[in-house]
Amino acid sequence: MDARKSGKPAASRRQFLLDAARMTCGVGLLGVGVGLYATQAKALPPLALRPPGAIKEREFLGACVRCGLCVRDCPYNILSLAKPEEPVATGTPYFVARQVPCEMCEDIPCVKACPTGALDHALTDITKSKMGLAVLVDEENCLNFLGLRCEICYRICPLIDKAITLEQQLNARTGKHALFIPVVHSDACTGCGKCEAGCPLEVAAIKVYPIELAKGEPGKHYRLGWVEQQKAGHSLVAPDAQHQYNLPEGMRYESGKGLIPGGEAPPPGAPPAPPRALQGGQL
Amino acid sequence: MNAQRASRVIGAEAVAVKGWLRAHKWLLARRVSQLSILALFLLGPLAGIWIVKGNLSFSYTLDILPLTDPYLFLQVLLTRHLPETRAVIGAVIVLTFYLLIGGRVFCGWVCPVNMVTDAAAWLRQRFGIKGGAHVSRATRYWILALTLALALGTGTLAWELVNPVSMLHRSLIFGLGAAWVVILVIFLFDIFVMNDGWCGHLCPMGAFYGLLGKVSLVRVVAAKRADCNDCMDCFAVCPEPQVIRPALKSVGGAGPVIRAAGCTNCGRCIDICAKDVFTFGTRFNKQAEKVSAPAQKMAAACE
């Protein structure tokens, strides 16, 4: 086999190169296949929710060893490990809110069971978990939007009046009734999925989505004027200058009424000087 | 070849000399080991007796003993995630265990795929299926490197998406799903496409444990290699026959200890040998060296 001993270095080298090429191609082909599959498997379908405390999906797929201890320690048997044919990365734990929602155990046994920290052990208060975010996706079919008082999502919510509140609005259809609109608050919602499971419609009008899907985000530079004003304790722009109107001769203006002919009296506090536009003879 | 085959059945001599039980004792021990480990894992989900939770990737025994697959643990580290202490302890325990008892002991004594590929190999021999694709046994080391590179490159446990070993074990415990298709493919592949194809040529998990075996303590030793009568039964029955020759025939003055990474410490060679040439020993087996000294002298004289 050795090139020097065989006396045919060229043929032996040729065979070696061929073998090496065959190996590289075969293994490379496998690598491309598995690599592309792994890239695709990074996308978690929106209806599959990770257990409480799951770190970011991308990192989760590197941290979770698919041992299933979270599945075993869940007292309500909510979690399951993805089978190879399911559209979730093989062997990773998930639950579907519409089928069985998370019961939000106070001692969070699933997180405690995780040996790798794919479920973050820093999560000790289940109400701080972010499995997803409930979104009232279908306002056309939600019974409360139709003026009925279903309110199941609101009543069933473990963080009632924090994660979901009912906001009163006028029922424009009847003109004399109220609509009680369920509003989800992202700071409190844990994504447990009780609302989605409880929705009495054939297909739930309220659904839990991964936070990245459910939530918008303003530009980093964006500030809300009134919030900034409150923070500063005073107005952040110079006080408004007194408004002046350039009114036609013999007219006066009153808010809500418009121009009033023959009005003599200028609005109280208005400077006696002639309109600025007329100064310097320019119009 | 055929004449030889007709005249003697592999292992018949061992059975005649030692009796059926002694000629199969390590095989039986392995099956007991494989099945009882699987049974321990299944006891929880099937009977509600929770001695072991989890699967071969990570398990927790009696709420006290963590065991982590060091190959998977290495991949997790390559995705730049540092696991919790429990997984680290588990990996150290398993690593130490296989460094003591032989790296590929995992393959021969624990892995559930071994029973599938052993069945395939048995059928292949039974029906005299020969030939098939020829691929270097070193391919598994390249696949091992590839799986580690994929963990590093994609930041995910990419190999775990397709790894038939963890897939079979996990699916037996947590619900079968389509994993049986993957296992069937491996079974048929081993029968028709490649002899000892999966375990002997491709599996990166076996390659990883094999590398541990290169320095592990317990090894098969050809202690009485002087008694070898060249019946070739050990070569016929060994799933990694290339590991036997250096130790048995003292190639290049090699000692009687089988040091090659491929050896799974399955003990088939011990069972099948009518002359009891092989035995389990340690890699520092000095006693074996003494026993085999005459053989070395003979070999030297012949040359």
Image (cartoon, coloured by chain):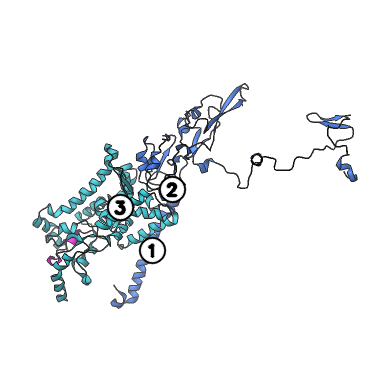
| The stretch drawn in magenta includes residue B95 | no
Is residue B40 positioned above or below A201 on the image? below
Instruction: Point out the image quarter for the C terminus of chain B.
Output: bottom left
In the rendered structure, the colour chosen for chain A is blue
Amino acid type at mark 3:
Ile
Chain on which label 1 sits: A
Camera-nearest residue between B168 and A130: A130
3 or 2: mark nearer the eye? 3
Q: Position of residue A110 (x, y in %)?
A: 39, 40
Q: Which mark is residue B157?
A: none
The residue segment tinted magenta is B225-237
3 or 1: mark nearer the eye? 3
Q: Secondary structure at mark 3?
A: helix
Spatial CA distance of label 3 from label 1 is 35 Å
Q: Position of residue A249 (x, y in %)?
A: 89, 34
Q: Is residue A215 at least partly visible in the picture?
A: yes
User: Label 2 belongs to which residue?
Assistant: A60
Say how many tags the image has.
Answer: 3
Judged from this view, the residue extending furthest toward the top is A176
User: Label 1 belongs to which residue?
Assistant: A24
Q: Quadrant of residue A166?
A: top right
